Amino acid sequence: MKEYNNIFKELDYQSIAIEILSSSINKNRIAPAYLFKGPKGVGQKEIALRFFEGILEKCSTEINTRNLLEKGNHPDLHLIEPTYLNQGKLIKKSEAKKENIHSKSSPQIRIDQIKDLRNFLNKKPLKSKFNLVIIEDVETLNESASNALLKTIEEPINGILILISSRPEQLLETIISRCQKINFNPINTKELENKLIKVKDLKQKQEILNLSNGSPDLLTKNIEYLENIPNSILDKAIVIPKNKLQALYLAKEITEELNLENQIWLLGWMQENLWKNKFDSFIIKRLEKLKIHLSSHINPRIAWEIALIEIIK
């Protein structure tokens, strides 16, 4: 029997996940749906693609399978990621970043994307026994898309779905229960500390490291966020406003200077710093509630004003 753990060779920082997936391929016991859960950017997508590579190698003589999968060009692979609605068109989150497109709303996985998924699953695969699907940031499913995905998973399908999530608690329990769960752990490596050289402030280095939760991918993104937000806002945001007027001014500055994505990141920065300085769970919970409001089409300025006023002591 051919051993398929070699396809994960340079990704051995997730040894437990790789052991489970390698065993599944070797024993030919493939589940119809998996939930890869853990911090963002700790190898979930890379390992998902290698897992599919191993499955394809059992039923195909394609010699450039890895290249096709990594470029997203394999005919039996369908990738889904959150999208923005921009001028009536859906723009993938990754494409929006490349094109520097900003939106006042948070990216979502939408019902049309799940409909496209169902159409894909209904087609006969071209080079495999299965249609292969990866859904990134699956916790961003809106309500209708979430129900549609549940219905898709409940029905017999000629496909293998991998759902990737850093916030599985936000998924429907019925979706979670129909998936084989694979845990991904934070990465403990010097690579994280080496990337922190770009951050000059020693205090900020520790905060960024904490926010990154052992993820090199998150670390890179957090450094970018830190560099894109004015220091004047960063400094004010980690101090509780002294009065209502100060809270209103801060809300105005934040919503006028930052797009919604940066505002949501700033809340994580505030939670990390304010918890260390105040140890007040009410403040942390109120800011978490603000994150939800900013993602729910509530007027950002009003949402910030109310939240900042409420945390004044």
Image (cartoon, rainbow, N blue to C red):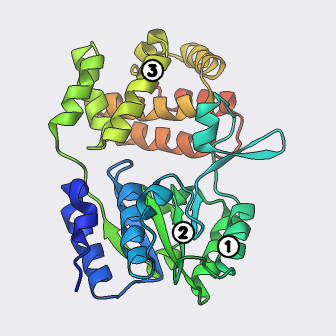
The quadrant in which residue 60 appears is bottom left
Q: Mark 3 points at which residue?
A: 237
Q: Which of marks 2 and 3 is in front?
A: 2
Please rate how many residues cluster around mark 2, counting C-alpha atoms within 10 Å: few if below 14, some from 14 to 19, many from 20: many
How far apart are the two marked residues, 2 and 3, measured between alpha carbons?
40 Å
Amino acid bearing label 3: Ala
- Residue drawn at x 56%, y 17% is 250
Where residue 265 appears, x then y in whole percent? 48, 33
Is residue 313 in sight in this rendering?
no
Mark with earlier residue (2, 1): 1
Q: Are marks 3 and 1 in contact (CB under 8 Å)?
A: no
Q: Name the residue under label 2.
A: 133
- Residue drawn at x 38%, y 34% is 271
Amino acid bearing label 1: Phe
Please rate how many residues cluster around mark 3, counting C-alpha atoms within 10 Å: few if below 14, some from 14 to 19, many from 20: many
Q: Are marks 2 and 1 in contact (CB under 8 Å)?
A: yes
Disc 3 is placed on an element classified as helix
For this orientation, the residue located farthest to the top is: 232
In this rendering, the answer to whether 239 lies above or below 266 is above
- Residue drawn at x 63%, y 68% is 146
In this rendering, the answer to whether 307 lies above or below 163 is above
Where residue 269 appears, x then y in whole percent? 40, 30
Mark with earlier residue (3, 1): 1
Disc 1 is placed on an element classified as helix
Q: Are marks 2 and 3 in contact (CB under 8 Å)?
A: no
- Residue drawn at x 57%, y 55% is 140
Disc 2 is placed on an element classified as strand
Q: Name the residue under label 1.
A: 120
Of the pair 181 and 25, the residue shown nearer to us: 25
The label shown at residue 70 is none
How far apart are the two marked residues, 3 and 1, measured between alpha carbons?
46 Å
Residue 56 relative to residue 214: left or right: right
